[in-house]
């Protein structure tokens, strides 16, 4: 397995309302072992605790943005947009994280 893209957020992602954003900071990529690990981080750098589990259904890059569709363990599906400042989100740089969509079913198109 490869590395994990990591973004520090001000508050939990599920606290965002559809269409809203919060500021994030792109961190160094993490080892894939952190998908399963919970516990202390070496050198007294904190503690890891899983708050959710999900699968990436789609990841697309468009200019300075990432569009990521995630299916969470609750079966909710969210489209998340991560926007850099003129370039894709880079390590050590701020970014905006938007909740672009939710798992609410789309209404069927009406027939005319």
Image: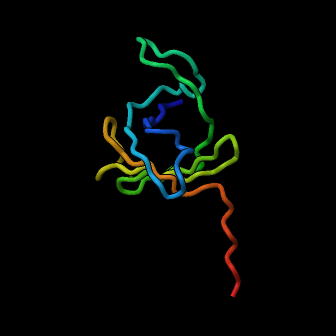
Q: Position of residue 71 (x, y in %)?
A: 63, 46
Looking at the image, residue 52 sits to the left or right of residue 97; the answer is right
| Image-quadrant location for residue 95 | top left
Q: Is residue 66 visible?
A: yes
For the residue pair 19 and 57, the one nearer the viewer reads as 19
Outermost top residue: 43
Q: Residue at x 43, y 35 (%)?
A: 8
Q: Which quarter of the figure is the N terminus placed in?
A: top right
Q: Position of residue 2 (x, y in %)?
A: 50, 31
Q: Residue at x 52, y 49 (%)?
A: 16
Q: Is residue 60 visible?
A: no
Q: Position of residue 68 (x, y in %)?
A: 51, 50
Outermost left residue: 86
Q: Which quarter of the figure is the C terminus placed in?
A: bottom right
Looking at the image, residue 57 sits to the left or right of residue 21; the answer is right
**Whether residue 62 is situated above or below residue 31 in the rendered picture:** below
Q: Position of residue 17 (x, y in %)?
A: 54, 53
| Image-quadrant location for residue 39 | top right
């Amino acid at each position: 397995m490869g590395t994990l893209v990591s973004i520090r957020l001000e508050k939990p992602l599920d606290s965002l309302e559809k269409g809203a954003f919060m500021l994030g900071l792109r961190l160094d990529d993490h080892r894939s072992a952190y998908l399963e690990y919970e516990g202390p981080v070496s050198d007294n750098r904190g503690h890891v605790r899983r708050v959710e589990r999900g699968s990436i259904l789609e990841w697309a890059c468009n200019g300075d943005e990432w569009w990521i569709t995630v299916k969470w363990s609750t079966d909710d599906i969210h489209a998340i947009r991560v926007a850099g400042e003129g370039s894709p989100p880079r390590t050590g740089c701020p970014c905006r994280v938007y909740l672009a969509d939710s798992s609410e079913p789309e209404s069927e198109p009406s027939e005319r």
